[in-house]
Each structure stands twice: as structure tokens, then as C-alpha cells.
Image: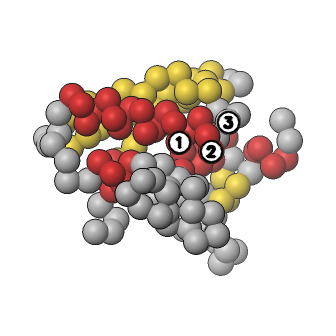
């Protein structure tokens, strides 16, 4: 494991006691990386991507906004999450992506294999896709 793998900026961004962005490591850093990939609108056939300098970075989770919340949407969410993590976090092994429909929203839990075991990361999809209209 290199130093680069053990230390990084926490997401959501927040300040630390040194008036800089807070840094983290371990499972919290892994969760931050996953949230960053899934929260960034990547280029698709219906959108040009959020980051002008790297339009393809991110996921297609934003395409789930204002869609019928049914089994097809849950499977599409699973595919979008797996695809984005496979592309942008290739060192991470996705064990399982569980999707549930709870009160008309999707509840997503991503299970990842790490060197020390598995990590479960709950993802608030409504916060990811509700950022902008």
C-alpha cells in the first residue's frame, strides 16, 4: 500500500482545525471516493458531463431523476453504480450493490472488498440526483 492510497480529502468537503480541507484515510476515504464518483454527473448520451476538464468522469446516476420507482429503475441503478465504480475506482472490488425502494426513494448500499475485510457504504441517491435540475 502506498502513501497515496492511505490518505486523501474527505467528502463531503469540510474544514479541519488548520483551516484546510479535512483529510481522511481507511474506510472513510474509500466511502468518500465512492460518493465522489457517484455524485459527479458523467457524460452520457443525454448529458455532456459535469466537469469541463474531464467530462466522462462520474456516473449516470443522475439519469434516474424523476423516473418511475420500480424494479427496472432499481436494476438500472445497480448497473450505473457498478459501471462507474469499475471504471473510476479499478482497485476497488465491488462485492454487492443492494437496492431497495423505501418511501418512494432508492436506498443503495455498496459493499466493497478491502484488504482488511468488507466495507458497506450507504448511498443517499436522493441527495446525489437532487443536486441540480
Residue 100 visible in this rendered orientation of the protein: yes
Circle 3 SS class: loop
Residue at 26%, 53% in the rendered image? 65
User: How many other residues sit within 10 Å of disc 2, few (<14), some (14-19) or many (≥20)?
Assistant: some
Residue at 42%, 53% in the rendered image? 45
Res. 25 mark: none
Relative side of 68 to 43, left or right: left
Circle 2 SS class: helix
Q: Mark 1 and mark 2 in contact? Answer it, CB < 8 Å.
A: yes
Res. 84 mark: 1
Q: Which of pointers 1 and 3 lies earlier in the amino acid sequence?
A: 1
**Image spot of residue 13 (x, y percent):** 54, 66
Relative side of 108 to 25, left or right: left
- Nearer the observer, 50 or 89: 50
Circle 1 SS class: helix
Q: Mark 3 and mark 2 in contact? Answer it, CB < 8 Å.
A: yes
Distance between mark 3 and mark 2 Cα atoms: 6 Å
Q: Which residue is mark 2?
A: 88
Residue at 21%, 28% in the rendered image? 71
User: How many other residues sit within 10 Å of disc 3, few (<14), some (14-19) or many (≥20)?
Assistant: few
**Image spot of residue 50 (x, y percent):** 49, 66
Which quarter of the picture shows residue 31?
top right
Residue at 35%, 47% in the rendered image? 124
Disc tally is 3
Vertical relation: 93 (above or below) 15: above
Q: Which residue is mark 3?
A: 90
Amino acid at each position: 500500500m502506498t502513501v497515496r492510497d492511505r490518505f486523501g480529502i474527505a467528502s463531503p468537503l469540510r474544514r479541519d482545525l488548520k483551516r484546510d480541507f479535512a483529510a481522511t484515510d481507511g474506510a472513510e476515504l474509500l466511502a468518500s471516493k465512492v460518493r465522489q464518483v457517484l455524485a459527479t454527473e458523467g457524460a452520457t448520451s443525454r448529458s455532456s458531463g459535469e466537469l469541463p476538464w474531464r467530462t466522462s468522469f462520474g456516473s449516470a446516476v443522475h439519469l434516474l431523476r424523476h423516473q418511475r420507482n420500480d424494479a427496472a429503475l432499481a436494476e438500472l441503478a445497480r448497473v450505473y453504480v457498478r459501471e462507474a465504480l469499475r471504471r473510476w475506482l479499478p482497485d476497488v472490488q465491488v462485492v454487492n450493490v443492494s437496492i431497495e425502494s423505501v418511501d418512494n426513494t432508492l436506498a443503495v448500499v455498496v459493499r466493497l472488498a478491502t484488504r482488511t475485510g468488507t466495507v458497506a457504504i450507504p448511498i443517499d441517491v436522493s441527495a446525489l440526483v437532487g443536486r441540480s435540475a
